[in-house]
Image (tube, rainbow, N blue to C red):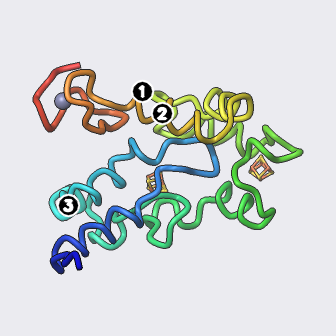
Amino acid sequence: MTVISITRQKQLENVAKFNPDSFCGLYCGACVRYLSTKNERINSLAIDSGLSPEAFQCTGCKTNQVSRRCKSCTIRECAIERGLDSCANCVEYPCTNLRLLHHNNSYCSQFDIIESLNYRKQNGIKSWLMHQRLHWSCPICFAEIGFKDKMCLKCGTVF
Ligand code: SF4
Ligand code: SF4
Ligand SMILES: [Zn+2]
């Protein structure tokens, strides 16, 4: 019988609860809140942002632990209410609310949610996730990188 240590089991549970997918087309896997929670850098970053670690913590838009910033996101609530996997499947896509997010969201200077949802519509979720994972990766060591990162925190490569 294989014995898994309690620490390893805890690590596996932690990995399992993360989900980089989203409703609005943003790739949660490159969000600073997501990456900080995953890499356990949450405390110092939360303090820098003037938030409690609990408000900052996030394991992705489609999980049970969503940051305060996105918990009450109207796009997220709307897609959940309509029982949709993402806005890409909505008959009203791209609605005014989504277009407003596209123009106003601070992430959107680095990330085009409409382009992302269009890609998802054409190629499906699996391809979208793979495409995003590759795009937001260090070209040298393949570590995950964030929207605003200028350097890989794992190997030090500067982008
Ligand atoms: S804070 Fe928002 S964008 Fe960032 S991972 Fe959480 S749900 Fe996604
Ligand atoms: S109405 Fe807009 S926000 Fe709501 S699911 Fe459709 S596209 Fe998304
Ligand atoms: Zn690297």
Q: Which of the labelled discs sits on residue 123, or is there none? A: none
Labels 2 & 3 near each other (Cβ < 8 A): no
Q: x and y percent of residue 132 in the render?
A: 48, 33
Q: Judge: label 1 CB < 8 Å from ligand 3.
A: no
8 up-or-down from 86: above or below: below
> Circle 3 is placed at which residue position?
40
In the foreground, 104 or 102: 102
**Kind of residue indicated by mark 3:** Glu
Image quadrant occupied by the N terminus: bottom left
Residue that protrudes farthest toward the left in the picture: 156
Q: x and y percent of residue 106 in the render?
A: 47, 39
Mark 1 / mark 3, whichever is N-terminal: 3
- Residue at mark 2 to residue at mark 3: CA–CA distance: 22 Å
**Kind of residue indicated by mark 1:** His
Mark 1 is surrounded, within 10 Å at the Cα level, by few (under 14), some (14 to 19) or many (20 or more) other residues, namely some
Q: x and y percent of residue 6 in the render?
A: 18, 80
**Kind of residue indicated by mark 2:** Gln
In the foreground, 22 or 107: 22
Residue drawn where x is 42% and y is 27% of the image: 135
Residue drawn where x is 46% and y is 66% of the image: 66
Labels 2 & 1 near each other (Cβ < 8 A): yes
Residue drawn where x is 19% and y is 70% of the image: 8
Labels 1 & 3 near each other (Cβ < 8 A): no
> Circle 2 is placed at which residue position?
132
User: Left or right: 74 with respect to 26?
Assistant: right
Mark 2 / mark 3, whichever is N-terminal: 3
Secondary element type, mark 1: helix
User: Left or right: 127 with respect to 47?
Assistant: right
> Circle 1 is placed at which residue position?
135
